[in-house]
Every structure is written in structure tokens, then in C-alpha cells.
Amino acid sequence: MNPITSPLLTDLYQLTMFEAYLREGMDREAVFEFAVRNLPPGREFLLAAGLESALSFLEDLRFSEAEIDVLARTGRFSKGLLAELGRLRFTGDLYALPEGTPFFAGEPLLRVVAPLPLAQLVETRVMNLVHCETILASKAARCRLAAGEKTLLVDFGLRRAHGAEAGLFAARASYIAGFAGTATVLAGALYGIPLFGTMAHSYIEAFPDELSAFVAYARANRENVTFLIDTYDTLQGARQAIRAARILAPEGIRVKALRLDSGDFLSLSREVRALLNQEGLPEVQVFVSGNMDEYAIRDLLAAGAPIGGFGGGTKLDTSADAPYLECAYKLVEYAGRPRLKASAGKATLPGRKQVFRRIDEGRLAGDTVALEGEAGVPGEPLLMKVMEKGRRLFPALELTAIARHAQAQLESLPEGLRRLDGRSPYEVQISPGLRRLQEETLRSLGIAC
């Protein structure tokens, strides 16, 4: 059993509810929608990601004999359920926002339409996949906005990511959001993301001195030469790196950057840049890593730090300031009737919904959450049908195409949403038809509006 792809990677209650639905014959069409209730503090928008992972999960969904045997040995489930799971495939429809699309609280990101037990069963893994990539893409998008279009950004965070899959998702999500590449080798193989890397302090320490370490590394990695210069004394390290560049130049080896990983990045970047310029090496960039996030990037560049690139690590790959989304996957229709939840603070809106987005002079101007097919709602619909009867409607997009879409979308954000300290809430309206359906559904349940 592959622990990442196994359908046993789910919550127990998905299976116990499946058992109850089966006994009651409740297998009519259900509609579930996945949305974020509230934006995390410090977030003005979120960037949709994870759709490709969700599609792959749904396409491949099946229980092996070994997995059925695991469930049988628990003694919890009937033979009827085990037989049903043994032949189970995802046969439903999926609607979704395209990856790389900004969205806001209360807007459905996904809609699953399938027989009730099946639509319920896929909840855990679909949420798990889309939640993770979306929170990481949203963090990375803020880094890109802070850095501007020309500054190099690279994902360096695998070692401190919350597990192997999260590290891969960070590489993928950050590339969608505009990063140039990642240090995660498997992400290069799986997704075609460009690979970047430098060296560790331990590498420098293993050599008799910095100069010999630099020269040896460059000769072994001729096309990817970035020297880490802060193992001992940063400015002395920069001088040794410049000496190494002089030794290597006749061999046709070009040094691309000097990397700072500690200290006062503002003053050190200025001093290192001055040394490089004095020695006739203006093409060698200053690259900074070490607890970099959108706030550090913004502040350094605003102060005029001559930094050509940043490596995002722990704070990026864990989305440190907003590590989770208050999101939910809720039933909005069953057997042709609208459904809702009226719990305090967690109420949901009934019915199949669409998000209509208005654009004014190339900028996002406001959204309306409405009933699917509701007439008279201004704007372009965002949710697209991407799977029908368990089959994709379109081939998987190249990651570069998703990244281009994301960049165009980020460029269309209003100025207030592009600023990290933006205080310009984006208008998301609820349509009259949706409000009416909510009131009618509440009345049908005997709940006062």
C-alpha cells in the first residue's frame, strides 16, 4: 500500500457514514462545495492551487485487495460495504477554479457532484490536497508581489517542510506563484521545475579554507556556481570568493552569485556589492537566504538592498504566519433539494453556486456568489467543469502554463490587494437569488430567518 495514494488515507467517519448510507439506500446525487470561510489574518486574497493533485486522486481512486483486507480485519464493516468498496471508482463530476486564480472568503473553490456515499468519501483527501497547495501558493504569491517581477525567487524549504508531500507541494505551488525554481530534486523530475542549489556551511568547514572549497565546488559544478560566504567572516568570505572567481575565469567557469545566509542582510549586501563592483564583477549577484518571507523581502528591497535573489525556506514551506485555512467541504444539495448548515459561525449557503467576477480596466472589480445559472448576474463565471463521470475533460496543463495564468491574475489584482499591508477589502456580494434560496431552505426546516 502506497501511503500517499491509498484510499485508506482518510478519516474513519467517511467509511462509517458510507456504511450507514449503504444500509439506508441513500445513493442519490449529492453536491458538495469546498470553500474558505474566512481569510487568515494578513491575507487579502488566496491563490487557488492543488486541482491537478485532486484530479489525479479522483482518477486513480480504488481499493486494492490488501486495503479491503485491512478494513475487514477491523471488524467494523459489513461484507456489503467491503464488496462495494472493492468495485468503487470515482464516477462523478468536478467543477473548479483554474489553478493560479485569486479567490476570496465564501467563494466555492471546488464542487463535487456524485452519488452521496462517493461524494462524501473523497472529502478528506480532496480537502487535504487543495488546502495544502493553496496555502503554500498564496504565501509564495505574496513573496512574488513583494519582490517585483525581476528579482529571482527560489524555493529552498524542503528540509523543514511538514513532510515529503508538503515539500513537493511547496515546490509546485511556489512555481505556480512565480518562483523561478526549487532545490527539491524530485520536484524537478515530477513537475519539470528548474533546479537551483548552492552549498552548505558543512561543505566549507570540511575544507582547509574557503578558497579551496570554492574552487573545488566550482570545478565540480561548472554551470551552477554560487558561493556561500558567511561560514566564518562574511566580508572575508566575499574576498575569497572573488579570488576564486579570478582563478576560475581562465577555465571558462563563471561565478553567478554570492550567497548570504546570516547577519545584517542590508549592510552586508551593500558591502559585498561594493566589493564585487570594485573588482570588476558587476554581473555577480548577491543572493540572500535565511528566514526570508514577503515581509523581509519587502523591507530589504524598500531600503535599497542590492540583492538580486532570495531563497525562501522555512517560512515559505510552512506558510509560517498563516499555516492553515478555515475551510470546509459541505453538502449543498441532495436528491435535488438544497441543503445547508445553520450552525453559529459556520453557516453555509445552499444550492449549486457560481462565482461571477467583474473586471474594470484590466483589474478585478468585485465578485458575486450566485446560484448556478442565475440570470442577470454581472461578470464572468469562474468555476469550470473539469471532470465528467470520472473522466477529465481536458489534458493536464503544463505547469508553465498554470504559472503564466497565475502571473496574469496577480497583475490584475487591485493595488490595495497587491500591498502586504493592504487595507482594501475586496467586495464579494451574495446574489438575491442565493439569499432567497437560503431563506426558503431555512423556512422549510422550521428555522426562523
Image (cartoon, helix red, strand yellow):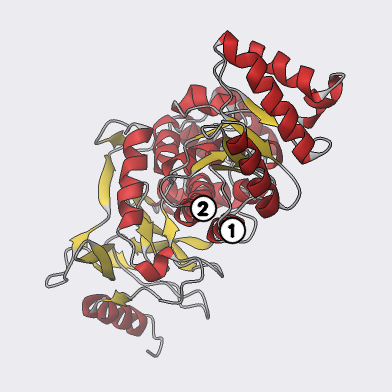
User: Which of the two residues, 314 or 216, is positioned nearer the viewer here?
Assistant: 216
Quadrant of the image containing the N terminus: top right
Q: Which residue extends farthest right?
A: 208
Q: Which residue extends farthest bottom?
A: 448
The label on residue 286 is none
User: What residue is rendered at 56% in x and 35% in y?
Assistant: 168
Quadrant of the image containing the C terminus: bottom left
In the visual, does 210 lie left or right of 373?
right
Return the disc, 1 or 2, that comes first in the chain's sequence: 2
Q: Position of residue 88 (x, y in %)?
A: 43, 34
User: What residue is rendered at 70% in x and 48% in y?
Assistant: 268
- The amino acid pointed to by label 1 is Tyr
In the visual, does 110 lie left or right of 208?
left
Q: Is residue 267 visible?
A: yes
User: Which of the two residues, 132 or 101, is positioned nearer the viewer here?
Assistant: 101
Q: What element does badge 2 sit on?
A: helix
Q: Give the residue pinned by disc 2.
A: 143
- The amino acid pointed to by label 2 is Cys
User: What residue is rendered at 51% in x and 50% in y?
Assistant: 140
In the visual, does 159 lie left or right of 88?
right
Residue 3, placed above or below residue 116: above
Q: How busy is the neighbourhood of tag 1: few (under 14 within 10 Å), some, or many (20 plus)?
A: some
User: Which of the two residues, 80 or 303, is positioned nearer the viewer here?
Assistant: 303
Give the Cα separation between the discs numbered 1 and 2. 17 Å
User: Which of the two residues, 390 or 22, is positioned nearer the viewer here?
Assistant: 390
Q: Give the residue pinned by disc 1.
A: 324
